Amino acid sequence: MEFTAFARRDTLRAVFFQVSSIMTSTGFSTTDFSGWPLFSRCILLILMLTGACAGSTGGGLKVARLMIAGKAALRELRYLMHPRTVRTINLDGKPVEEGTLRSVLLFVFMYIAIIGLSVMLVSLDQFDFLTTFSAVIASIGNVGPGLELVGPLGNYGAFSDFSKLVLSFCMLLGRLEIIPILLLFMPSLWRRV
């Protein structure tokens, strides 16, 4: 009886630590979660995508952006059923301005598009999908370990130099919040300066 209680407590400690480490993008690992069930690893991938709360230096999309994007999707679905209604999106009881909503939706779209493009480029190394996908998610979210070959006991050394450049660029985009880096590639910005 004591052994199972001890094992349960140890398991809960490992789970809580890994969840908080992944959401806050600290990169620490105390257990090999590559051996966890697929459902648990999928939750870890979702947490890598989600990231921390707004105002945090953690990586990921951020919870507030996902809440705003979800509310915008619900508003559009309601608009399809009732086209004459006017609904505002509120966050913490305050209305979200349309400019803020546009920038959030742009960020979410660019984040997903960059993940898709990066997964395609890194997949040229012919690793399994979970390794490739989690490497990109962990890189753009600045999480640290991914799953499978890039898990807590693995590393990114097996990737080609090209893939390492792609993953490094993902890390840079994720840390600097995508938009400022992408603006550097717009010729109109250079002409104005």
Image (tube, rainbow, N blue to C red):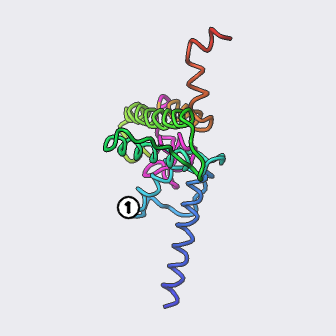
Main secondary structure type of the part rendered in magenta: loop
Residue 175 within the segment the image draws in magenta: no
Disc 1 is placed on an element classified as helix
User: Is residue 51 visible in this depiction of the protein?
Assistant: yes
Task: Name which residue lies at 53% across and 41% down.
Answer: 139
Q: Which residue is nearer to you in this view: 1 or 99? A: 99
Q: Position of residue 143 (x, y in %)?
A: 56, 48
Q: Which quarter of the image is occupied by the C terminus?
A: top right
Residue at the limit of the structure toward the bottom, as seen here: 1
Q: Nearer the viewer, residue 153 or 82?
A: 82
Q: Is residue 132 visible?
A: no
What residue lies at 51% left-to-right and 41% top-to-bottom?
157
- Image quarter of residue 124: top left
| Relative depth, front residue between 31 and 170 | 170
From the viewer's perspective, is residue 151 above or below residue 99?
A: below
In the orientation shown, which residue stands out farthest toward the front?
84
Report the magenta residues as a range: 135-162
191 above or below 27?
A: above
The picture places residue 116, in percent across and down from the top left corner, at 40, 35
Three-letter residue code for mark 1: Phe
Give the residue at the far top of this rendering: 191
Residue drawn at x 53%, y 72% as measured from the top left: 12
Residue 161 falls within the magenta-colored stretch: yes
Total numbered circles: 1
Residue placed at 59% from the left, 57% from the top?
A: 21
Residue furthest left as drawn: 81
> Which residue is labeled 1 in the image?
39
The reply, left or right, for residue 156 in relation to residue 81 is right
- At which x and y percent is residue 138? 51, 45
For label 1, the crowd category at 10 Å Cα-Cα, with few meaning under 14, some 14 to 19 and many 20 or more, is: few
Residue 104 lies, in percent from the top left, at: 53, 37
| Front one among 158 and 9 | 9
